[in-house]
Each structure stands twice: as structure tokens, then as C-alpha cells.
Image (tube, helix red, strand yellow):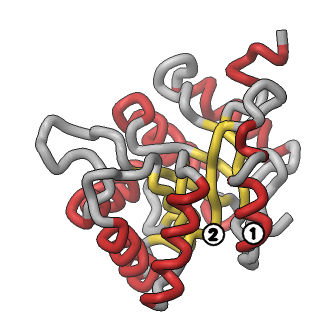
Amino acid sequence: RFLGNTGLKVSELAFGTQTFGWGADEKTAHALADLFVEAGGNLFDTADSYNSGAAESMLGSWLKARKNRHSVIVATKVFFPTGDGPNDVGASRKHIFHSINESLDRLKTDYVDLYQIHCFDLSTPLEETLSALDDLVRAGKIRYMGASNYTASQLEKALMLSKIHQWESFSALQAEYSLIVRSTEWELLPLCREEGVGFLAWSPVAGGWLTG
């Protein structure tokens, strides 16, 4: 299926890598990634903060070993602390520019398909965040930009600002959604449908509670 109103085709299921480097060592991570691709999946979701970058590094080593970067979709995120410095967290231009280069190094690629703001940054002007992402799209370091854990009003404001300034806009929104957590249905899902924003559900089986 297509990701929102984009021309990017993604599998209906994404492969989350949060346990890479924690519950799964590199050998196990590679084997699981192989099984996912063999089953028809192509979307891998990770983040720079997952296990201090280990998740991105393991995914990157798999991409290098399999030589399949062109056939998979890589989504990663930025926001949470990656160091002890005052600018090693958030969605400022400085942190975003630094973090994308670090992520590209770990992932062993020169671009990310979907770059997501992991959490709304209350301390950084939204215009700064959006213009930085727009610059990364134009520089070819990211193909599409996305948001994660935004409220409907935060997403709506971001989309409005992008239209006003003629910047690239969010192509996807990631939020918690499962049979247990359904508040997303109230405002976020209707907004995504209305604006053509692709929706990615995290923790769809409620952290294992729905699988027994």
C-alpha cells in the first residue's frame, strides 16, 4: 500500500527494531530481518535512541551484508537524548542536523526514507523543526518526513505551517494504537484521513498483552 498521499509503497506490517541490541543480538536480529523480508515485508522502523544507537547499527550491518538497501524502506526517528550535552536532545535544527548524520553512519546508508520527530518538542519553535526537515529533504538525506506521538492539534498546526511556508510536510504520523488503546480514533485518525497522512501504529499488540 502507499504511505499516505505519497508514491512510497510500504508493507502493511512494519518491522520494529526496539529490541535490537537489548533482547536480540546481531545474529538474531539479522535472522529476524531476513524472515520479515522473505514474508513480503519491506518497512523497517528504528530510532537513534533505541539502545543508544545499537538498533540502527544492527539494522545497518544487515543492510550492508544483504546489499538490499534499494529494496527496503528505512524509517528512523530523532528527539530523545543521544548524549549528555544540552543540545543532544529535542527537535532543534542543531540536534536534527547532527542526529541525521549520526543515524546515516550507523545505518550505513546515505539517505533515510522516512525521518520522524519522535516526540513533539515543546521548547523548540515548530517552524524551526519543520524548516530543518525541509532542508534535509532538499539535501537528499531524507525522502519523507514524519511525526510520532503528536496530538491532533500539534499535527494540524504542523501541516498548516508547512502549507503556509511551502515546505515539505509530514507524510506519516506514528502513534500508539491497539484494541486496548483506541483514543487515536477520536481525532488523530480522522485528521490523517482528511489530510492524506499515512498512519503507523506502534505497539499494536499492546506490548504482548494481546498475544498472551
Q: Residue furthest left?
A: 85
Q: Residue at x 39, y 38 (%)?
A: 49
Q: Observer-nearest residue: 6 or 189?
A: 189
Query: Label 1 amino acid?
Result: Gly
Q: Observer-nearest residue: 183 or 66?
A: 183
Whether residue 60 is visible? yes
Q: Residue at x 45, y 55 (%)?
A: 117
Report the Cα–Cα distance between label 1 and label 2: 6 Å
- Residue count near mark 2 (Cα–Cα under 10 Å), binned few <14, some 14–19, many ≥20: many
Whether residue 64 is visible? no
Indicate which disc residue 4 carries.
Answer: 1
Dot 2 lies on which element?
A: strand
Q: Residue at x 50, y 57 (%)?
A: 116
Q: Residue at x 68, y 20 (%)?
A: 207
Q: Observer-nearest residue: 146 or 52?
A: 146
x then y, percent, for residue 133: 40, 72
**148 lies above or below 197:** above
**124 lies above or below 158:** above
x then y, percent, for residue 7: 75, 78
Disc 2: which residue:
171
| Among the 4 quarters of the image, the one containing residue 202 | top right
Dot 1 lies on which element?
A: loop
Quadrant in the picture for the N terminus: bottom right
x then y, percent, for residue 198: 72, 63
In the image, 99: left or right of 146?
left
Q: Mark 1 and mark 2 in contact? Answer it, CB < 8 Å.
A: yes
| Mark 1 or mark 2, earlier in chain | 1
**210 lies above or below 26:** above
